[in-house]
Structure formats: structure tokens, C-alpha cells
Amino acid sequence: MDHPLEKRIKELRSQLHYHNYRYYVLDDPEISDARYDRLLRELEDLETEHPEWITPDSPTQRVGAQPADKFQSVAHSIPMLSLGNGFNFEEVREFDRRIKRFLKDDQEIEYTAEPKMDGLAIELIYEKGVLVQSSTRGDGLMGEEITQNVRTIQSVPLRLLDTKVLPPDRLEVRGEVYIKIKDFQEFNRKREEAGEAPFANPRNAAAGSLRQLDPKITAQRPLHFFAYGLGLVNGRSFFSQWEVLQTLPNWGLPVNSLIRCTPGITQCLDFCKEMETLRHSLPYEIDGVVLKVNSFALQEQLGIKSRSPRWALAYKFQPSQETTLVLNIEVQVGRTGTLTPVAHLKPVLVGGVEVSRATLHNQDELERKDIRIGDTVVVQRAGEVIPEVVKVVTSMRRGEEKPFAMPEKCPVCESPVVRLPGESAHRCSNPNCPAQIKESIRHFASKGAMDIEGLGEKLVDQLVGKGLIRDYGDLYYLSRDTLISLERLAEKSADNLSQALQQSKRTTLGRFLYALGIRHVGEHLSGLLAGHFGSLKALMGVSEEELIAIREVGPQVACSIRTFFDNPRNREVIDKILAAGVGISEEKRSGNRPLAGKTFVLTGRLEGMTREQAKEKIEALGGKTANQISGKVDFLIAGEDSGSKLDKAREFNIKVLSEKEFLQIITVSQ
Ligand code: IVH
């Protein structure tokens, strides 16, 4: 018999595995993120109390390992092959004809058609449903063992689900690790802010993230996974690729939902056309379509030719590249003072979208590519989304092109520009630079931060330009009259903005932290810190060591947080914001939960809230709920028309609370 706590631990784990599946595989979560976090926190707490019950497949154990010295080589049980390419529809048709010739059969072939994810291939090995190893493709025969890094990818199950179909004894799964375009942009923006070299495209970012020796770093990278095939399998047979693609999700392995099974090559080409249109609106990058003969029996007959299977083909989309002229190179000043060179291009259509600007990232990048004003350059939309300059067409040079150098003075405030040792970014040295101030105010007001609707770019420019505000704290001291006096601001808009400012005063600690714009502290980390420390005061007083002790916080981040709060100027602005009446609802600390260890049963009808809401409240404060009265229950909350549970509670001598008494308890505890 399991100890009751051990039983609860197992229950929590299986709930978390299930909700991960709802989120990552079905893309249809059943519970809120906050609730998921609470379940995870409860499990973390129980495991802290009972480390002897921790198992490697527990959802808390995604980041646990110490940094490695180097990666070990591992052999793949079955080689990871590469794919032959088809660059146009004729080559795709030829692939189909080749197969028919080889099989000496003219019947239409059934193919699966799958978007070709532009990330990198990995293999996952599950033994008895538990993830035991993961590796990169490497040269196809040998790869690098990256298990600890792959474990940090939330969409990779640490344990396979067994609710619908039992997983086989051994299952080798292959698939692609990728980064979503939006996450990639945000990630690069942060790197540039921190003076680090940006990645050229999402694929490189994914590869770089997986090749980190420290899994803590990988854990901070927004990696995702889609499964598309198998290696060695023991204990189950499959008859077709489609069967594989339909089965993997039942085990909790995410598969791209755009996949299709087609009756013949014509339908494959239709799918390719469809994907070529759709690719621009997908959240991730695809660079083609992979066609595979569906039947495994036929695949077997067709076999392999020079490390690519005869039964598969990658149809590659036309690369969207164009040439155009660099009209000028200007620098932009970001929120933390980073100077980013931006090329102004003669507008050109690339893959159907007009491109007129492209980031050149930093001085090093610019020098490496030797981009000069007046150059003819090849531009592409990296992964078809972010415009970038690929290279200069040097044969088009006429000798009049002008090299660009980073300015020595900030183009906005004329303060000296500095480049700190070890950083690739140049920065404006003036913390009061209007460009930095404007950016930090825009960030403060943005959706994920204080969410001040109506405070657009132009308005911020005016407010800062006219000296009406010097930092984001001043926003809360703007009068209606001042707002109306601004150019182009109608009374109605001024009223709306005043209202939005008022509304933003009620916020959460996570949002507030994010809004402060501390370097390296993004939305996710802000939420995490809020949950951990519970109050702004606690966080402001924390030491670097305490910060580093938190999962996901490295020395660089810890230093940045400490430096921010040590700066008297920042403290002043925070005080100003609080004095204006900004109220931060403090998230509860994970270790300090007033109802921890108490179990509640609810019965009867409640007046002021639903039972679900009452349960959420109890759980938020660390308590538990049960359905039945037993000796382990501490309180019965009895609403209207309470029935047999009330009698039973009296039998067990359990304290009975009215709804009013319950409300009192939770109000005091909050
Ligand atoms: S199948 C023999 N399916 O494309 C089968 N590959 O050279 C080999 N890729 O880097 C792979 N999406 O990671 C397959 N749906 C998909 C794919 C896919 C992307 C990548 C793969 C590898 C390259 C193939």
C-alpha cells in the first residue's frame, strides 16, 4: 500500500502528464495555466518533503542535471537517413514515376504528405514508456547524446501516456525540434539587448539551444517538438506511416496537425500548393513538404539508395530571395540603449511581401557581410518572415559605395556610445536618453505588461519630447488637462487614456515586474519570480545567491535583477508608481501557503461562488479538496441543502464551516 502522500504524488504526476498532453498534443487545454502551475507547485512541495519518492519521469524533473563537460557520441539503432529533394513539381512527378517503375506497377501510390519543419532532427528513446535517451541526428549513424537538454522541452513527454493504447516496450521516435517565429524574434531581441550575437534564423537558434552544455540554459529557450517517424520498435508492429502518425499522439507525442494521407501524387501536389500559400501564416517555419510512401511493405520493397530512402522525397519551396539596393543605414536605439543598425532598402517584393527595411543586427555582422550604403544586396525573408540581408552582390559594386561605421555619439541624445568588453552591441551611455526612455515607456504600457490601451508610439513621443514625462512612473501623474492639451488628442481619447491608466493600476506582481523592463527578465521569468517571492518587497531584498538557487535563473539574470533594484533611480520610480496608487496583487509564495496540509470537502449550494471557484481558492492557498468525507478531512464547507455529508462529518467529528465562515478564512489568509 502506498503512503497517502505518495499516492497523491502519483496522482499529481499523472494529472500533469495528462494536462501536458491536452496542451501540447491536442492544443486544447482543460485547465488554466495558473491551475497547472498550482498542481506543479503542490507536487514540487511534496517532493521537497519526500525526495526519496522523486522519479526521473516526474514533471518536476525537467531541469535537474548538472552541466556536462561535453556531449557523448551514441549510435542510432537504425540509421537516421536523409531525404532526396525535389525543387519543382516535375521533379515530384518524376519521383512518383520512379517508384512505379521500380515496383513495376502502374497503380496509384498512397503517400503521406507532411509539412517539412525547418528545425533539427532528434531521436527520443522510450523504454517501458519512460524517456531514457535522446540524441541529435549527427551523421545519421552516430549522434550526440542530448537527453538532459531534450528533457527540458515541455512538449516532449517524459513518460508516454497509456490511457488509449499501451506504449510498446521500446519505442524510438524521431522528429523535429523547432522554435516558433514569434519566440525567435523575441529571443533575438533580448540577445541583442544583452549585447549577444543574434541567431540568423529559428533553425540555428534551435540547434544552438540544444547544444548547450548547461540544461538550465536550454530550459529557458522556447523549444517545441513534432514527431514524424520511428526508429526501432519492440513490442508492436505498424503497417503504415499514417498509422504511426495517428498513433503517436495517443502516447502524448505531438504530431503536426496539417499532415495528410493522399491517394496519389496529384493530391500530393495539391497539398504542396496549399502549404506554399499557408507557410506565411504558420507560427513556425516550414521549408517544404515531405512525401512518404504510406505502406511499410512497399517502403521495404523500395529500400534505400545512397543514404536516402527511395520511398520519400522532400519537396522544397522556392527560396524567397530578391536583390535590391541599400539606400541608407541608420541606427535605432532600443529600451536598454542598444544601437541596432538597420538597412533602408529600395522596396522589393520578397515571397509576396514588400520589404523595405532589414536589421543588420550589430557592427560585427555588418563587417562580416561587408554591407555598404549603395550596395546591391540579396535579401530574403528568413524562414519567410524576418527580412535579412544575405550577402552583397560584389560584382555590382561601382566603387561609390560607402562603408558604415557605428556612430560615436548616440543619434538621439548625442551622448557617447560605448561597447562593453565581451558584448557585440554598442550602447548609448546615457540612461536618460529620450530614445531609451520612450522605449521603456512603450514597454511598460504594452499588453503583457501594464496593458495601458491608447498609449501609442506617437503619444509617447510627444509626452517625452515635450518633457511632460521623464519615466514610466510619471504616466500616473498626468492630468486630463495635460492630455487634452496634446496635439491630436481629442477629449474622448484623453478620457479613454485616463481610464486606461486608472485600470492599469490594478495589476499582478508578474505583470509589474515585466513592466519594469529589467534586462533579461521577460514575461515568463517575471511570472516565475512573482510566484516564487510573492511580493515586490521580498524580491527587492533578495540576494544574487538566492536568485541563482531558483531553477531557470542563471548568474547573468540574477546580477541584472540585483543591479536594477540597487539603482536608487529605479527605486525612486517604483516608489512613485506605488504612491500613485498602483496596487499589486501579491502572488502567494509556494512555500508559504496558509491552507497547506488542510483538506476540505464541499457540499450543498454556495451563494457567493461556484464550487469550482471555491476549490480554486482553496488550492490557491495551498489547501486540498476531496469528494468524500473521511478521517483525513479537516473541514466540511456546508452550503444550502447540505445532505448526508453533513451527518457524516459530525460522525467523524469534522469541523463544519458555513459559507460565511469559509469566506472569512480565505479573506484572512489572502
Ligand atoms: S522524414 C527518411 N519527415 O528534414 C526519413 N523529415 O533530411 C527522414 N524533416 O533534418 C526524415 N520534417 O529532420 C521527415 N515530416 C518530416 C520532416 C523531416 C522535417 C527534416 C528532418 C531532416 C530533414 C530530412
Image: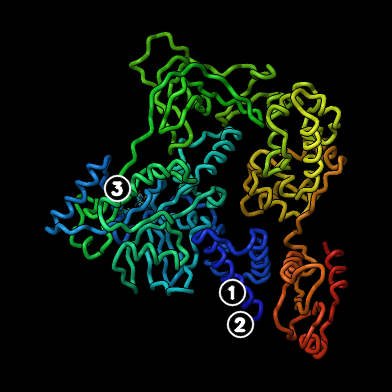
Residue at 86% in and 43% down: 581
Q: Is residue 560 visible?
A: yes
Q: Is residue 188 above or below residue 433?
A: below
Q: CA distance from mark 2 to mark 1?
A: 10 Å
Q: Quadrant of residue 624?
A: bottom right
Whether the residues at callouts 2 and 1 have beta carbons within 8 Å, the answer is: yes
Whether the residues at callouts 2 and 3 have beta carbons within 8 Å, the answer is: no
Q: CA distance from mark 1 to mark 3?
A: 48 Å
Residue bearing the label numbered 3: 269
Indicate the amino acid at tag 1.
Lys
The local crowd at label 3, few if under 14, some if 14 to 19, many if 20 or more residues have their Cα within 10 Å, is: many
**Secondary structure category for the residue under label 3:** helix
Residue at 79% in and 53% down: 585
Residue bearing the label numbered 1: 10
Return the disc, 2 or 1, that comes first in the chain's sequence.
2
Q: Quadrant of residue 480?
A: top right
Q: Is residue 568 visible?
A: no
Whether the residues at callouts 1 and 3 have beta carbons within 8 Å, the answer is: no
Residue 269 at what x, y percent from top left? 29, 47
| Of residues 51 and 11, the one drawn nearer to the viewer in this rendering | 11
Residue bearing the label numbered 2: 2
Q: Is mark 3 within 8 Å of ligand 1?
A: no
Q: Is residue 260 above or below residue 446?
A: below
Q: Is the N terminus in the top left, top right, bottom left or bottom right quadrant? A: bottom right
Indicate the amino acid at tag 2.
Asp
Return the disc, 1 or 3, that comes first in the chain's sequence.
1
| Of residues 184 and 347, the one drawn nearer to the viewer in this rendering | 347
